[in-house]
Image: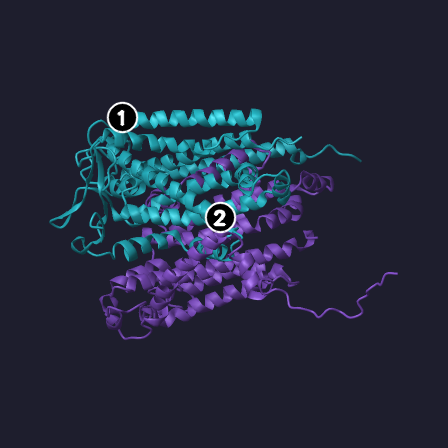
Chain colours: A cyan, B purple
Amino acid sequence: MSSSPQPWNNPKLRAFAIQLAVLFVVGSFVWIVVDNTITNLQRQNIASGFGFLENPAGFGIALTLVEYTEQSSYGRALLIGFLNTLLVAVIGIFIATILGFTLGIARLSSNWLVAKIATVYIEVVRNVPLLLQLFFWYFAVLRALPLPRESLSLLEVAFLNNRGIYVPALLLEGNGLVLGLAAIVGAISAWLITRNAKRKRLETGEIVKGAAFAPLLVFVLPVLAFLIFGMGLKAEVPSLKGFGFKGGWSLIPEFVSLLLALSFYTAAFIAENVRSGILAVSKGQTEAARALGLKPTSVLRLVIIPQALRVIIPPLTSQYLNLTKNSSLAVAIAYPDLVSVFSGTVLNQTGQAVEVIAITMTIYLSLSLFTSLIMNWYNRHMALVER
Amino acid sequence: MSETFVRIKHAPERMPPNAQIGMVRWMRENLFSSWFNAVLTILSTVLLFLTLPPLLDWAVFSAVFSGEDGAACRVDSAGACWAFVEAKFGQFLFGRYPAEERWRVLLTLFLGVAGLAPLLIPSEFPKKWFVAYLLVPFPLLAFVFLSGGLFGLATVETSDWGGLMVTLVVAVTGIAASLPLGVLLALGRQSDMPVVRILCVVFIEFWRGVPLITVLFMSSVMLPLFLPEGMSFDKLLRALIGVALFSSAYMAEVVRGGLAAVPAGQYEAAKALGLTYWQSMGRIVLPQALKTVIPGIVNNFIGLFKDTTLVLIIGLFDLLGIVQSNFTDPTWSSPQTATTGYVFAAFVFWIFCFGMSRYSVYMERRLDAGEQR
């Protein structure tokens, strides 16, 4: 009655066969694509290889953090683009985090008006495409500003026009070392004072008055040093020369609009993460902390926030990654980021689509894989140890 | 002997103190509960006073609602130039789709909505048939109606498609392709077979690691290189492929979260009943997994819908693209044209995205009903 099982009913054999088939299909697909690409490249006489990175680029870039001229190589242009991406991403992340936490807490505020304003902001900004917001800031706001000649000015020292934002540059004359030294001394003493205060509190329960202000030393000492030594701190005010402003610090409108769009947009998402993180902390925690006699501010700082952060940080990192990847929208307003400089200008000049796109994708991919590695480590480290 | 006093009449009822009723009480509790809240309330009120009146003035009171050309909008005190939107409305919806053929787009829209609406309304409809209709006949019908060339319909090249229509085509195709692909990828990522698992992980991590722009660049400049000589894809189709692959990776991660949330006992029970892999996934695991991640799935749809705007960078004219290309029209050029156009486009996108998110909240509540006490 019982017959030996058919080979296709043996799970191990079947799994092996399926995997072999999948491997065959994917392998042949890749092979066909690679073969086609090689044939097409040869037919169209497109050079291949990464030798082009050494060739002179021959184009200028509007914003360069390190030295770059038109004679610099394509490889150098790649570096400039990458640095510009990092610049806008880092500053954007900073602003988005502060704004996002504020909005997230505001949306949970017991103040009806504040909560409603935060809700409206979040629901509007979250549901409008980022590219549209970017265009709005760039074309409808910053490009619509007056010409340099009719700049909006703040006390005749800072200027706003359609070429960008100009603020006075603070130039340090004389011994800047003293200021740096003062800051370091301030930081060390702040750390010592805080540590001693904490030890005393843990041992005796006494609270050292004023210790909470110790971190301010980092700023106070340099200011004192500045006042005592009276070093020359010169402000270079931008002034209208010819058709544009010279001197001072300036921000190009492309950078400003990209920064505004990215940070306002991401802040709305961060706010939602923060809100759900705070709501995830059970109400019993607040009540227990209050029952122990902690002040409302201490409840928030010592009980709610540490537990909420555990929930907030993983989605927060993916928002940071999103912001970094979204900074590639720069290409739409010609802010010289990685995609705009490399996948745009360099691709058009060299025609080496495969290499250029591969390099661009590899850079973004390594950025995000690196971040997820750190996140996985962090999650293991922070995972709640349950008994 | 002591006398006792017993009250035999009710004391007259008095009103609660003014501060404890109505508006005043509400304000005390919600706006002025502490000095900090009072400061916040005052600051917010100032903020609203500074922003709302100019905004209303711009959008309504000083706005130009009708006009033959941009002359009325070029006046110094003019607000929003709604006349521009009115004049270009057809273009914003259909792009350069020939005016006499636009009924085909509307018919397609109607066919789609007719198939989709019964699915969205939770009731005892036999949903199977609507799903089947949406999966097979509808895409074919939509293709025939939109691009023509069959049954005596004039051919309309995809380069003439534009506006909201392209936005919807890209978004709907992306959504329709990404859900099944994402489910398959998520299942593959959980598979016991190492080859399948590794391939899925590599695929998912690759698409999630790169920005959509580079994907679109890739599909527009590299895809032609991948194909054999003489074979070429339509520009719109290339963008569609890029968008679908990209969003399926994100969908896979959402579904994976749902699969992880299904208790292991469910998998084991399904196996113990003797169900095959596909039966246990299709009938036991996926229904539970997908239910828990509805908010995530809808969020993905919303993200995809917003991301469709990126196709304008590779030269397709979606809603944002067509609005922006109309700013260069000299008859309508005015200081307010660009702002008005952007606000209009933002409003359209907002309606769709906000609608989707409200719908997901509603569905979440409904599906949760069994678990609420």
x and y percent of residue A93 in the render? 39, 41
State which chain disc 2 sits on.
Answer: A
Report the residue marked by disc 2: A104
State which chain disc 1 sits on.
Answer: A
Between residues B48 and B309, which one lies in front from this camera angle? Answer: B48
Between residues B363 and A110, which one lies in front from this camera angle? Answer: A110
Query: Which residue is pictured at 57% across the width and 28% down the height?
Result: A205
Report the residue marked by disc 1: A178
Q: Secondary structure at mark 1?
A: helix
Q: Secondary structure at mark 2?
A: helix
Residue B367, labelled with which disc? none
Q: Looking at the rendering, which quadrant does residue A227 occupy? A: top left
Q: Looking at the rendering, which quadrant does residue B52 occupy? A: bottom left
Amino acid on which the number 2 mark rests in the picture: Gly
Circle 2 Cα neighbour tier, 10 Å, few/some/many (<14 / 14–19 / ≥20): many
Left or right: A194 in relation to A155: right
x and y percent of residue B304 in the render? 45, 51
Between residues B89 and A231, which one lies in front from this camera angle? Answer: A231
Amino acid on which the number 1 mark rests in the picture: Val
